[in-house]
Image: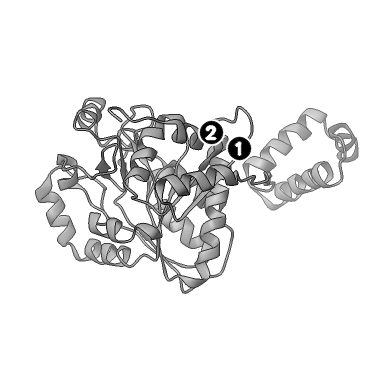
Amino acid sequence: MDDERSILLARVSRLYYLEDRSQNEIADLIGISRSAISRMLTEARRTGIVKIEVHQPLLRNEAIEQELQRRFGLTEAAVIDPGINASTPEALHVVGQMAATLITRYLPQISVLGISWGTGVAATVDALPTLHLPHLQVVQIIGAAGSASNLTDTPDLAVRTAQKLGGQFRVLTAPMLVENAAVAKSLLANRTVAEALDLASKSDIALVGIGSTNHTVSSVLRAGYVNQEYVETLRKQGAVGDVCGLYFDQTGNFLDVELHHRRIGISREWLIGHIKKVIAVAVGKPKVPAIFGVLAGQLVGTLVTDKYTAEDLLAYVPENG
């Protein structure tokens, strides 16, 4: 786009958004049609000349937060009301804002922030403020998602986090799942991968999503790593969900499944030993069994979710439970 076009788009946008002129008024002032003004406003938003932000109040439900902490032994729970009949993307947006607020308060005191992937993590990264923290290192703690995924599931999240926070980043140059255990062993011995995982093990805080074996929200299925039959096999083995690609049952016990032997990511021992440092972000009824398993096994220290997911969670009775 040339400079003259940019200046014109900015002028039209300023008149419309900041001076409350109507499109007809702007058309008369500039000497073009109203339909052209409408197209220019759309172009201004598409090209980033205009950025619209909606700051929804973060209304926390303290009663539900306290009940979650009491029942599951959480260090902290943050439960946000997204509004009546909010869609999953809308709920993710406000929950991501809340998670970003929680993480931001810790940032000046920490050196390493670990980042996994998933929709909840992506919503949190989107909501992070722009800061200048050159001391901070952001590290990817599990391998990248498969080729069928999108920017919610790639090293892009670690890079974007570091750029927003004004810190450094370290990506894990490997997929989360490889063909077999031998390939995984070889990759884990690779110097670049080993150094990234070593830094990951020094994470002061880890931001994670909660994966599910529900076909509609399975992250490994979405990423193209496995097919529905494999997810069903995991379910038959008792898996209800995963944290960082480590699968657990409804009581939160990690399972011995084939997939773990070809996984590239932060160790099970780190997660077990640093639970209080793990902040999980998850939303939606399909994920309730997985979130319940995480909490039952006390696999995370902080849960950020929305009011309706939390209510379903408190009412949930696991199978054979």
Q: Nearer the viewer, residue 63 or 102?
A: 63
Q: Residues within 10 Å of mark 1 (few under 14, many from 20)?
A: many
Q: Are marks 1 and 2 in contact (CB under 8 Å)?
A: yes
- Which element carries disc 1, helix, strand or loop? loop
Q: Is residue 32 left or right of residue 290?
A: right
Marking on residue 236: none
Kindly identify the residue that appears in the image at 46 percent across and 74 percent down.
135
Kindly identify the residue that appears in the image at 57 percent across and 56 percent down.
101
Image quadrant in which you'd find residue 29: top right
Image coordinates of residue 11 in percent, x first then y, are 80, 48
Disc 1: which residue? 82
Earlier residue among tags 1 and 2: 1
Kindly identify the residue that appears in the image at 63 percent across and 29 percent down.
84
Disc 2: which residue? 308
Q: Residues within 10 Å of mark 2 (few under 14, many from 20)?
A: many
Q: Is residue 241 left or right of residue 15?
A: left
Image coordinates of residue 240 in percent, x first then y, are 30, 34
Rendered position, 225 above or below 10: above
Image quadrant in which you'd find residue 137: bottom left
User: Distance from label 1 to label 2 (Cα)?
Assistant: 9 Å
Rendered position, 49 above or below 231: below
Rendered position, 103 above or below 295: below
Amino acid, disc 1 = Pro
Image coordinates of residue 308 in percent, x first then y, are 53, 33
- Which element carries disc 2, helix, strand or loop? helix
Kindly identify the residue that appears in the image at 26 percent across and 41 percent down.
248
